[in-house]
Structure formats: structure tokens, C-alpha cells
Image (cartoon, rainbow, N blue to C red):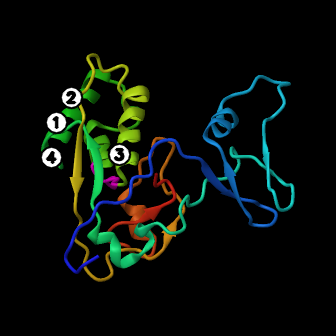
């Protein structure tokens, strides 16, 4: 990779398996996608658990109890000096992205229709949602995030929402990138408050997490 040259990340495809660290001996254990799906889907009481075992020590690997680890230990994005020279992706319902004004207007209108905001005012909810980190990732991660949102979050919003795939570059100054790859900081819907990034070693810029596809 030449200085100043931006490159595409190698495509991983969508038919991938998952990797976990054995809690007993630390050996990396590969879990096929269909087995991962079965283990993370609710099973009726009395149904036997379908667990994999560590090939090294025989310990059961319960994917509902542990988080996936890095799939590719040779991933180019693990090299700190390559992160700002790669193309990244983000899927968004906005053709012009980022568009803070459009997001604020759409969010306020959606919340106003619901009328129930719990203990928060509309302004407080808006401030919470506009102080979240932006997720960028691989092509596959952006597409999967779009499909997840259309399946889980957009079903009650009437007509299908169009999405746009944005290919982006990032500019990093010295000290902007937190070194290494950390555990996921997201809540159950994937939100990461910027405050958590600042608490994580004072990082001002991107933070790499295991959720990368």
C-alpha cells in the first residue's frame, strides 16, 4: 500500500462462521453459522442444548454466554497505520449523509407521534440520540446492519424506507485512534454513547470492536 493511497478491504462474504475463545484453555473454537443460529434461538424447556465443544479440552462452548472474537487475525484493519487508508462503509436512510438537521427533524417528528416518552422530554431524547457514535465498518457489516434495521426497527414505520450505502474515508490525527481492538460497548440495539468512547482511553476518534464482519 503506497503512501496516500486508499484501498478497498478484502470482501469476507456473508457465508461466514463465528470464532470464540474456550473459557477453559483459550483455544479458538469455530462455530458454523447454522449452529450459531440454533444456539441463539429460543429452545423450549426440556429441549437439549446443541453446544459445540473445544477440540483441545472438550469444554462446551455456549455462544449465549460469551462474545465472538476476531474472525481474521490477519485482518488489515488490525494494523493501526492502515485504518485511515482503507475505505469504510455506512448504510443510512439519508442520501446526504451525515445530515444532522434531517436526522433531528425526522427523529422529533417520529417521537411526537408516539407521545409517550417516559421520564424524558422530546429535547432530552433528541440530545441522547444525537450524542451517539457513528458506526462504520466493512461492506458486509453495512449491508447486514441495513437488513437488521429493516427487519427489526422499520416494520412499524409504514412504507419501506429506502437506504443508501455510503463509502467513506476517515482522517485521523496522531492519538485519534484507540490502539488495539476492544470489546463491544454497544447496548442491545447497537447504540454507543460518545461518552463511552471518551472514557475508553480518551479516544477522540474511531474505536475498533469485535462486531466487525
Magenta span contains residue 134:
yes
Instruction: Kindly indicate whether the residue at mark 1 contacts the one at mark 2 (C-beta within 8 angstroms).
Output: yes
Q: Seen in the image, is 85 located left or right of residue 194?
A: left
Residue 195 location, quadrant? bottom left
The residue carrying mark 1 is 105
Q: Residue at x 22, y 62 (%)?
A: 169
The residue carrying mark 2 is 109
Q: Seen in the image, is 119 located left or right of residue 86?
A: right
Q: Position of residue 191 (x, y in %)?
A: 41, 48
Q: Earlier in the sequence, mark 3 or mark 2?
A: 2
Rendered position, 155 above or below 183:
above
Disc 1 to disc 4, how far (Cα)? 10 Å
Q: In this picture, which residue range is highlighted in magenta?
A: 130-136
Of all residues shown, which one is farthest toward the bottom? 174
Q: Nearer the viewer, residue 204 or 150?
A: 150
Disc 4 to disc 3, how far (Cα)? 18 Å
Q: Nearer the viewer, mark 3 or mark 1?
A: 3
In the structure shown, which secondary structural element does the residue marked by tag 3 occupy? helix
Q: Position of residue 100 (x, y in %)?
A: 17, 47
Q: Which mark is residue 142?
A: 3
The residue carrying mark 4 is 99
Magenta span contains residue 128:
no
Q: Position of residue 24 (x, y in %)?
A: 82, 63
Q: Position of residue 208 (x, y in %)?
A: 43, 64
Disc 3 to disc 1, how far (Cα)? 24 Å
Amino acid at each position: 500500500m503506497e503512501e496516500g493511497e486508499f484501498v478497498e478491504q478484502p470482501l469476507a462474504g456473508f457465508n461466514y462462521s463465528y470464532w470464540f475463545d474456550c473459557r477453559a484453555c483459550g483455544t479458538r473454537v469455530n462455530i458454523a453459522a447454522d449452529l450459531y443460529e440454533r444456539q441463539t434461538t429460543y429452545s423450549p424447556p426440556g429441549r437439549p442444548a446443541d453446544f459445540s465443544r473445544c477440540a483441545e479440552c472438550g469444554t462446551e462452548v455456549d455462544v449465549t454466554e460469551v462474545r465472538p472474537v476476531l474472525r481474521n487475525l490477519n485482518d488489515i484493519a488490525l494494523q493501526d497505520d492502515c485504518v485511515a487508508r482503507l475505505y469504510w462503509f455506512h448504510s443510512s436512510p439519508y442520501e446526504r449523509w451525515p445530515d444532522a438537521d434531517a436526522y433531528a427533524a425526522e427523529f422529533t417528528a417520529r417521537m411526537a407521534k408516539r407521545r409517550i416518552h417516559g421520564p424524558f422530554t422530546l429535547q432530552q431524547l433528541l440530545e441522547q440520540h444525537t450524542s451517539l457514535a457513528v458506526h462504520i465498518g466493512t461492506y458486509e457489516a453495512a449491508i447486514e446492519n441495513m437488513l437488521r434495521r429493516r427487519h427489526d426497527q422499520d416494520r412499524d414505520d409504514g412504507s419501506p424506507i429506502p437506504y443508501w450505502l455510503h463509502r467513506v474515508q476517515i482522517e485521523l490525527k496522531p492519538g485519534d485512534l484507540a490502539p488495539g481492538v476492544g470489546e463491544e460497548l454497544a447496548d442491545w440495539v447497537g447504540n454507543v454513547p460518545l461518552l463511552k468512547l471518551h472514557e475508553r482511553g480518551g479516544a477522540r476518534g474511531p474505536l475498533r470492536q469485535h462486531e466487525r464482519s
